Amino acid sequence: MKNKLNILIFSSISLILALFSISIYLDLKYQNDLLNEQLNTLESSIKNEYKQRLKESINNTIVYIDTMYKHLINEQNDKLNLNKENKKVLINETRKYLYNNIQDKSRYTWINKIINYEGGENFAIRLIHPNLKRTEGLFLSTKTKDIKGNLPYLEELNGIKKNKEIYYTYYFKQLNTLEVTEKLSYAILYKKMNWVIVTGIPLNSLNELIKKEKNYLKRIHKKDTYNLTFYRGIILVLFILILLILRKKLMLTLIENEKLNEKLEKKLKNVETNFSKFFELPINIFLIADFKGNILQVNSGWEKILGYKADEIVNTNYLSLVHPHDIDKTLVAMKELEEGHDLLFFENRYKHKNGSYRTLAWSANTLQENGLIYGSALNITELKEKSEIIYQQSKMAAIGEMTANISHQWRQPLSVISTASSGLLLKKSIDDLDDEFLINTLEQITQSTQYLSDTIEDFRNFYTPSREKTEFKIAHVVKKTLNLVKKRYESENIKVIKNISDITIVNFENEFLQVLINLLNNARDQLAKSTEIDKFIFINAYKKDTKIIFEIMDNGGGIKENIIDKIFEPYFTTKDKSIGTGIGLYMSEEIIVKHFEGQIKVENHTFTYEDKEYLGAKFTIEFNA
């Protein structure tokens, strides 16, 4: 291991040095290419800048000349062309302007007047030239050559004819010197007077500026290259030092790890021994199987709980032991495990060796890399039997509540029937029974009888077992529930305020109705003890993201803090044992958690209604939409 570490460290250093050298070479090449590109761009940029300056200078001159031209033509009768006198004035004023605006000996503007656009001898006349005043009035020829044999006047004329303006260069001797230099010129046609207005700049001064800027860029490039290489070198040295220090640390760590590994191997053997002992504990069922359900290993819990010895079920498929009615949901659970999901408290029934069935609660997970399921199961057969007893007790308690509700619901219609029938008998006995009174009385009896029939149907639906999920509206269930209990609420002056969104769900309708009755009865009992004159129950239902929220809240003063955490426990009640079983809220929680896969919670809540502050219990149910 130590030799491998040394090889790895020194190979890394060699590789880093090679990469560093390649990186420096490529970076230097890139920087040089970039410098050359910048130098080329610089020269072009400076020349373009000077061209723009030349053009701006000419434009300023044209603005002056055009202003003078408009002023002079406005003073004469002929508004189309300047007269001879005003032409002289324009030339003299322009001459003064150009003479006074020489920027330096090499920067000035001159004007030639075109006589013949076809060129040739005497095609133009030198009108104004601040630097060569002696040439003013001389004729110009397109055949005239500069020092290097170029034809600048011909090039200028062709550009003017084609584009009305032109940039061009020519060579000349600077005034009072023998130095030959290239000059960049810009010429534009002032059509009103057939003037070609020209300015230029010797390129020797421009080249000196370009050379200066290039030297500056080269110095910057040289400095940056040096700094880049220097700092990279420092980083490389530091990195190599870090690797060497790391090597030393790793060598020490390896020595310590070797000692630690020896200790861990001993502990691992102890853990394996303890795991084997734990796996063989007969308290729960332990299982190792593949994704197809083939049993690979079991513990002695199988014999204690289901009666099978290990050699009887290893290499068999556990689906052969599952109750036929539980096969489908077991296959779904197997699929979830295969997809990498954990399984928590999954219930199904397994066949005992004697032919009976045991209810098991499984928890399992998988290792995707070896394709195995690791599961453990708790025997909850007795617990399920007790749960069924509690459920029946809850149903019986609900029947008691409903019986009380029936008595309130039927009291008024039975009274109507009794009074109507007594009236008929009295009228008949005194021979005062007419057809109209008979028909009206019979209609009252019929309506009351129909009301009794509808009430019976509502209560019958409540007690009808529902094994399948159905689609229903929450508002409809609330309305049905309130119809079952409204008479008792009215007799106790309890007002129900509803705020229910239009929500449709697919679930167990009767079980949801049972939960609502339990919560409403709980609120009614609390309000019965309240000293509040106005008694309210608020029912809210709405969607929040992917959740459905259902709330029942009263103004009965709330639940004592020392018992609020216990109210969902079985057989816990704050009522007298003769009227309270303590299983209504427990069953409500069982239904919401296990059947609706949601949660129910309670809290004391302070709120304001109609400008008055109240305190009451607030039950909140939450489940997936």
Image: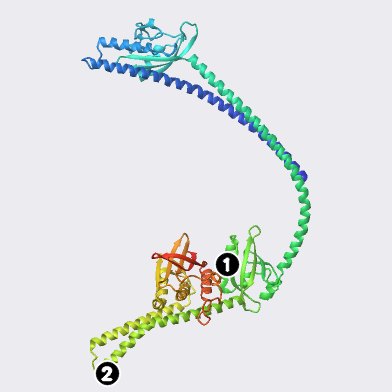
The residue indicated by pointer 1 is 331
The x and y percentages for residue 120 are: 36, 9
For image coordinates 50% across by 79% down, the residue present is 395
For image coordinates 56% across by 24% down, the residue present is 217
Label 1 is placed on what type of residue? Leu
Q: Nearer the viewer, residue 475 or 139?
A: 475
Up/down of 502 relative to 354, above or below: above
Up/down of 350 relative to 444, above or below: above
Foreground tag (1 vs 2) = 2
Q: Classify 10 Å Cα crowding around label 1: few (below 14), some (14-19), many (20 and above).
A: some
Circle nearer the N terminus (1, 2): 1
Up/down of 570 relative to 120, above or below: below
Which quadrant would residue 249 be assigned to in this image? top right
Task: Measure how far apart labels 1 and 2 are at the Cα level.
Answer: 76 Å
For image coordinates 74% across by 62% down, the residue present is 271
The residue indicated by pointer 2 is 429
Residue 358 seen in this snapshot? no
What kind of colouring is applied to the model shown?
A: rainbow
Label 2 is placed on what type of residue? Ser
